[in-house]
Amino acid sequence: MTSLEIVTGDITKLKVDVIVNAANNTLLGGGGVDGAIHKAAGKELLVECRSLGGCTTGEAKVTKGYNLPANYFIHTVGPIWKGGQNNESEVLVSCYQKSLLLANSLAVSSIAFPCISTGVYHFPKVIAANLAISAVKQFLKEHKHHLKLIFFCCYIDEDYQQYCTLLKGSNKKG
Ligand code: ADP
């Protein structure tokens, strides 16, 4: 059984095996959660990221966790919301799927996701939360995996409330 948990606050403070980063195509750092992760992890993260040659939107790449307790970061690039007719939903789901596939290949047991694309990429929060939860549940149903604990880390209260509402009443276990 895998437990799905909703938490608030800074994702860099979580004691998990893998922290997912909502990165940009360069993988060279940015604002929001990406900036917080690079700041907390230290300069060595940027050195490793430089060697990765960027990342396509909807894909994911792994690095070490450096100064954080997390063993790894998985950097995924969410879609920029452009009205909803440009495969934004499919690409966001792909971010969660590819990140979970990578985590699975690392044989880790816990992972934390931020609310990918809902900051400067302007993905509507309710749609994003629904897609995030359903993508994770679908993955758990379809794959043999080692994951015991999956966190949805909500930095702002609106996201936290949204995730709680969506998960409440439904089976929290994957
Ligand atoms: P994107 O470019 O994918 O929209 P952002 O970093 O702008 O990425 O926003 C993604 C989400 O990360 C937003 O919900 C934002 O509130 C949240 N966020 C920002 N800083 C942190 C942090 N330190 N820990 C967790 N979530 C964060």
Image (cartoon, rainbow, N blue to C red):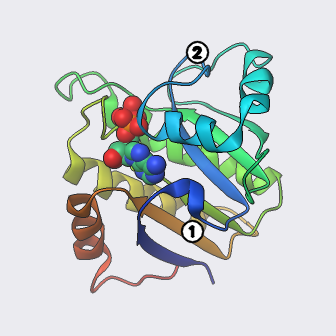
Foreground tag (2 vs 1): 2
**79 or 87, nearer to the observer:** 79
How would you rate the neighbour count of disc 2 (Cα within 10 Å): few for under 14, some for 14-19, many for 20 or more? some
Report the amino acid beneath label 1: Ile
- Could you tell which of marks 2 and 1 lies nearer the N-terminus? 2
Ligand 1's quadrant: top left
Position above or below: 14 against 115: below
Q: Is residue 8 above or below residue 114?
A: below
Residue under label 1: 150
Residue that appears at 76% across and 48% down:
67
Residue at the far left in the pictured view: 83
Residue depicted at 40% across the width and 54% down the height: 132
Residue 172, quarter of the rendered image: bottom left
Q: Residue at x 26, y 71 (%)?
A: 166
Q: Is residue 117 left or right of residue 44?
A: left
Q: Position of residue 163 (x, y in %)?
A: 30, 67
Q: Is residue 114 visible?
A: no
Which residue is label 2 attached to?
26
Instruction: Measuring from the top left, give residue 23's x and y in whole percent.
Output: 52, 30
Q: Amino acid at mark 2?
A: Thr
Q: What is the spatial separation of the Cα atoms under label 2 and label 1, in whole angstroms?
A: 26 Å
**Residue 51 image label:** none
Which residue sits at x=78%, y=63%?
108
Give the image quarter of residue 81.
Answer: top left
Q: Secondary structure at mark 1?
A: strand
Residue 151, image x, y percentages: 52, 67
Left of 174 or right of it: where is 64? right
